[in-house]
Image (tube, coloured by chain):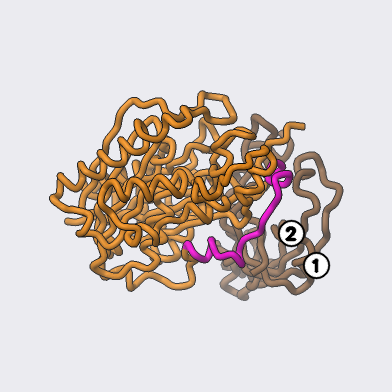
Chain colours: A orange, B brown
Amino acid sequence: MPAGIVSYGVYIPKYRIRVEEIARVWGDESDVSGNLNVFKKSVPDVDEDAVTIAVEASRNAIRRGRIDPARIGVIYAGSESHPYAVKPTGTIVGEAIGTNTDLTAADFEFACKAGTAAIQACLGLVSAGMVDLGMAIGSDTSQSAPGDALEYTAAAGGAAYVIGKDDLIAEIEDFYSFTTDTPDFWRREGRPYPEHGGRFTGEPAYFRHVTNAARGLMRKIGVSPEDYDYAVFHQPNGKFPLRVARQLGFTKEQIYQGLVVPEIGNTYSGSCLIGLAATLDVARPGDRIFVVSFGSGAGSDAFSIMVKDGIDKLGNGVPLVRDYTSETKNEYMDYAMYAKYKGKLRL
Amino acid sequence: MTMSTAPRFWRHIPQRYNLIGTHCVNCGEYYFPPREICPNCRRDTVMEDYKFEGTGTVVTYTVIHNATEDFERQTPYTLAIIRLDEGPRLTGQVMADPDDVEIGTKVKPIFRILGKGGEKGIIYYGTKFVPV
């Protein structure tokens, strides 16, 4: 019996800082926004973290699909900014969305692809008939050292997907993963900010893993880019997904709907899951979506998704991605306020 | 520990996360925080748990400019008495520019960090509000 997505929800904080403002502070006179194809990034409020974002996204998923939370038997929460080193994010989400105690939960970490790894794990339990529904979450308030190149894009946001076998809005036809030991980006225990290999994170990391996962899946199920209406690739900036799409044979038209990074930055574990949500926001039954995540360290998960009739039965009144990215819903801050909100000022 | 002990916070999780109160089926009154005995009905109380929607109206408010250490990075912020649509009143933080909050403002709930037990303690999550 096919399995896939029963509902989904997203959450993106309302605050934004312009990339140009960050460049101004650090004296970078190059066209950073143009070079990255990122113009602003989301900033969490002082009382938001990966847990609160996960809860808001999960509640949106529950409302959109009119899901009885008691049916959820597993919560896997992916993040690289879990607020507790020891104390699972998933337990707090479960309590906050009203699951019962007949529940298994665990936190995932795989840089920017922990959310898609959570979807894979939920799919396994659902497909085996061991749980009725699973909740897979990708949520981050990503960190970046002051003045580091990551600071231009490291943003906050998340998405939650309810995985099941009945009342599908989209069937996950198959997935394929490509994983190696590639130290392009890391954060040691107890350190506040990640380190990275600079340009090394391009070819040997992002492009190698995304293209291998994508080609592996296409080979596995015998498809080509023309078979898809939409494609979503992990979005560390606005250039990489465009370039990798071109390398693989996808068109700009296929990826523009899910390309959210120019407006919100890189939401790490939320990145391609928010891009997928933006695509599902407009998708019609019969549309086919190709999704490839990337997590530094490194690995990629590729998914082939077929939109089903159930998408027309979802509840209204739940925020779409564009409701969070709408210019009228955003509040801009300067670097000083950003530094205060992100706790970069040590008193 | 600056806010409460772990057991004390744990006991209040249903109220703080999901605004779980009570409803007297006998007279129809709603209570938050929850009561076991309805003061209207006393021995005739028929109480049930009730999850409030969390939508309500600002009855009155104050803007905090000089906060305790835990909240000094959030100043100025708004504390309001909010009348939930079902009737009970509670005190909550309204996360908005203080100029955007006034008596009669309609609000809805959001899930946020209420406080932290310093660098090492528990993170206290719960409900705050934003204007609708």
- Residue A133, percent across and down? 32, 53
- Residue B15 colored in magenta in the image: no
Which residue in the protein does label 1 denote?
A: B60
Q: Residues within 10 Å of mark 1 (few under 14, many from 20)?
A: some
Residue A100 visible in this rendered orientation of the protein: yes
Which chain is indicated by disc 2? Answer: B
Which residue appears at 51% of the width and 31% of the height?
Answer: A86
Q: Is residue B48 visible?
A: no
Q: Position of residue B54 (x, y in %)?
A: 61, 65
* Position of residue A158 measured from the top left corner of the image (x, y, whole percent): 48, 50
What is the C-alpha distance between the residues marked 2 and 1?
A: 10 Å
Picture mark count: 2
The amino acid on which the numbered mark 1 sits, given as a three-letter code, is Thr
Q: Is residue A323 left or right of residue A244?
A: right
Label 2 belongs to which residue? B91
Q: Is residue A335 left or right of residue A179?
A: right
Vertical relation: A33 (above or below) B41: above
Range of magenta residues:
A321-341
Upstream in the sequence, badge 2 or badge 1? 1
Magenta span main SS: helix
Residue drawn at x 74%, y 69% as measured from the top left: B58
**Height in image: A188 above or below A241?**
above
